[in-house]
Image: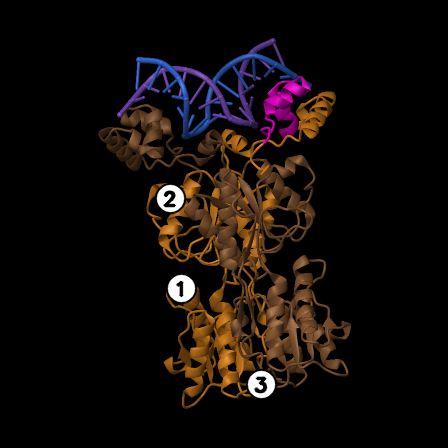
Chain colours: A brown, B orange, C purple, D blue
Amino acid sequence: MSAGRGAPPPTIRDIARLAGVSTATVSRTLMQPTLVAEETRTQVLRTVAEAGYTPNLLARSLRRREAGAILVVVRDIVNPFYPEIIRGVEHAARGLGFNVLMGNTDDDPAQELDYLRLVQSRRADGMITLTGRIPGLDDPAVQRVPIVLAAEPVPGHDLPVVRIDNRAAAAEITRHLIGLGHRRIAHVTGPLEQGLARARLEGWRAALVEAGLPAGDEMVAPGDFRVPSGVAAGQALLARPDRPTAIFVANDESAMGVLSAIHAAGLRVPEDISVAGFDDIPFAEAFDPPLTTIRQPRRAIGETAMAMLHALLDGSPPAERDVVLPTELIIRRSTGPA
Amino acid sequence: MSAGRGAPPPTIRDIARLAGVSTATVSRTLMQPTLVAEETRTQVLRTVAEAGYTPNLLARSLRRREAGAILVVVRDIVNPFYPEIIRGVEHAARGLGFNVLMGNTDDDPAQELDYLRLVQSRRADGMITLTGRIPGLDDPAVQRVPIVLAAEPVPGHDLPVVRIDNRAAAAEITRHLIGLGHRRIAHVTGPLEQGLARARLEGWRAALVEAGLPAGDEMVAPGDFRVPSGVAAGQALLARPDRPTAIFVANDESAMGVLSAIHAAGLRVPEDISVAGFDDIPFAEAFDPPLTTIRQPRRAIGETAMAMLHALLDGSPPAERDVVLPTELIIRRSTGPA
DNA sequence: CTGAAAGCGCTTACAG
DNA sequence: CTGAAAGCGCTTACAG
């Protein structure tokens, strides 16, 4: 096994010795080249290249008192909603010279706390939280941690956040259904302990009430954002006496379950019943039929969150603490005239 | 804005002073508590708790010469194949006291190189590569980087790898189709510059040849693992004179495209034509119909890769350098009798 | 333009 | 069982 063996990698002292200069000069050549005479610089750079020298980032970070890394925390990276956001974060981070640490919480507050500690331990300069929850936020030590919230605000606190207007977007897609002539429009909810699931329910209801259409409990079926809950909700709605002609499902994943339930019942989408989702996950376009949904600007959410965190770390003026990014109604073939 | 302001966090010197001991004793209390007298230990721990002290991990890492982090590199985190592997890595890493840095390469060798540098810069102790490619592997400095390959071996090198037997699994699912009585079984390939796509093609061909069934070019349609390529390949296969009664698609995503093409042509799955995929991505079960496929032990791939990397870092005996994990044929409703 | 020196915050032989 | 001291590998005022 060669890895781990062999000569230790060269340090700045080795380079200084080889180039016949001080470590300060080597450091300046790498950090602030304009401060170094051209001739000296050339010589140092040549030595660096020949020796294959790479500065120890741990030492640099310790000295400069910045980790050069940020942490992004999600409930579950397997959920297709998150990866594109993380990608946006990473893309922006690269441009700013930061690395990205991954934190998966499995929806467990204890793990959430562990990740907070990681920032307190200075392994990361700050964190972007997508979980809508921050344990121990009353602790002053926690309040000192630079945090930006993405996608989900944390209730009761005014941390900087980048998000979408879930209520307005839900109302918009419901109005699309109304505009198609539907009058019995059901809703399959997300887990209502999550604020964004409640916001989507409210948006749906507001649009119906505004149009004078029924929005009572008989038009609502509970879901939890996952496929099986969509199947169950779809079956329940189809079994009701006066069955809906359209269903707005709180996210795309569970909409897929609703589609299965409808097909299994021998009905067709959108001829017999229209279905709309929310999120526009990568697969939504490949659904059968392709799903009408609300597109979230996931990439932009990630990039914006990173930019906001960077400003926070910089001590820049607070700019905007509550950024609301626009969504887009994507009309595909899963919705049609009543 | 409170973040970034306020008193700086306490250091080990502050705790030592407050507890009336040396920094060495504070450090020992945290790192090797058994070496410290119980009374002293209690006193130190109380002080630590009261002050809300968290050791600076950057300083610890510098001193101990280990970053306490590993890097996992993927082509594209948005690809539904990767997140579960990353989750496995992270899960194992947590148990071993490592953090996980995320590296997205967008299939760009330059970015791949940047991530290698990150390890050389000691920000990570080693890396797990899922891209099937390592730039500059002839460079001795690169050879010194602890690397474990997951899912995809790098051709021409014998780095430690954890993988599945793509050829055997492809043959197995093809035999399932043969067992159902199909005699014209087509294949939609992945991008053939990837070794695993070639292995799946070979497995398909081997099973057919073994059964004396046609396996010529007329039974093959090119794909690239994405949905649209599946749509195109499906259309092409349906248009051929003697159309297949079953299609083995090189991965689930493109199988979804094949399903769309079949439905769009007014045919039914599996009554008119059977379809099988590969990977068992989270959505495969929710396809319409649910997809017969090969399940890759993604979580185990991630966990095993982390364990192997840890052994490598430990300098433990090389154990096994080529770990082949078992796959599983998952039979769902997309395949049926010929 | 360059170097000597201090210091970032820890850990760990070494000595007692 | 504990402390004084060295040192991990850098960066950056400070002085010249």
Which residue is tagged 3?
B337
x and y percentages locating residue B68 in the rendered image: 53, 39
The mark that comes first in sequence, 1 or 3, is 1
Q: Is residue B92 above or below residue B244?
A: above
Q: Secondary structure at mark 1?
A: loop
The answer for which chain carries disc 1 is B
Q: Position of residue A136 (x, y in %)?
A: 69, 41
In front of the other: B331 or A338: A338
* Picture layout, residue A180 above or below residue B3: below
Residue B142's disc number: 2
Q: Amino acid at mark 1?
A: Gln
Which disc, if any, is residue B102?
none
Q: Nearer the viewer, residue B338 or A84?
A: A84
Residue placed at 77% from the left, 75% from the top? A218
At 42% across and 87% down in the image, what residue appears? Answer: B239
Query: First in sequence: mark 2 or mark 3?
Result: 2
